Amino acid sequence: MTLFQNFPLWAALSAIVFAQVIKIPIRFIVTKEFKPGLAFSTGGMPSSHSAAVAALSTGIGIVSGVDSPLFAVSCVFSIIIMFDASGVRRQAGEQAVVLNQLIKDFQYFVEGAKDWNQKGNLEKRQELKELLGHQPIEVFFGALSGVGIAFLLALLYV
């Protein structure tokens, strides 16, 4: 099988692109805020991690069969990735929110004692990324979109 004929790979890559791009209109519909940079960021609805691994597992199931050892490995891998996206990474994002608030509170306190605004940008700390992980519903819809994309692409590839 050549690289361009590797259906599970292209299903997974297509699912990532779809999930990342669809975040822009979803955000616009929900908040009326147009943020094209969402296509290159982590977190948000739907989970591109979940979309990718679900499309990969579905593609392997379509090509190799759901009774193949490769499909079993892919399913376990997918479950771990989706659990991590909604668990560990989400907790890290929530900790980033608290740390950013502590930094802001500390900076406010320091402003009274020092001339914080006169310091250079290199001396100021950059905020931590807060949108790291996913809510369970984001993981669910990421996985659902990945499965759907794999089946749609199967009509073209297989």
Image (cartoon, helix red, strand yellow):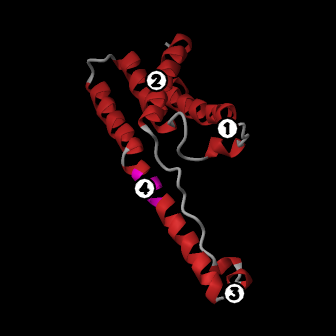
How many discs mark residues in the rendered view? 4
Sequence-first disc among 4 and 3: 4
Q: Which mark is residue 144?
A: 2
Amino acid on which disc 3 is placed: Asp
Residue that carries the numbered disc 1 in the rendered image: 31
23 or 73: which is nearer to us? 23
Sequence-first disc among 1 and 2: 1
Magenta stretch holds residue 92: yes
147 or 69: which is nearer to us? 147
Give the foreground label among 1 and 2.
1
Residue that carries the numbered disc 4 in the rendered image: 92
Q: For numbered disc 1, what is the local secondary structure?
A: helix
Asked if 126 appears above or below 122 in the picture, the reply is above
Residue 118 appears anywhere in the view = yes
Residue drawn 62% across and 35% down?
A: 23
Asked if 158 appears above or below 101 in the picture, the reply is above
Residue drawn 55% across and 72% down?
A: 105
Residue that carries the numbered disc 3 in the rendered image: 115
Magenta stretch holds residue 103: no
Amino acid on which disc 1 is placed: Thr
Give the foreground label among 2 and 4.
4
Real-space Cα separation, disc 4 to disc 3, in angstroms: 32 Å
Give the foreground label among 4 and 3.
3
Real-space Cα separation, disc 1 to disc 2, in angstroms: 23 Å
Q: Position of residue 40 (x, y in %)?
A: 63, 45
Q: For numbered disc 3, what is the local secondary structure?
A: loop
Sequence-first disc among 2 and 4: 4
Q: Are marks 4 and 1 in contact (CB under 8 Å)?
A: no
Q: Are marks 3 and 2 in contact (CB under 8 Å)?
A: no
Real-space Cα separation, disc 4 to disc 1, in angstroms: 24 Å
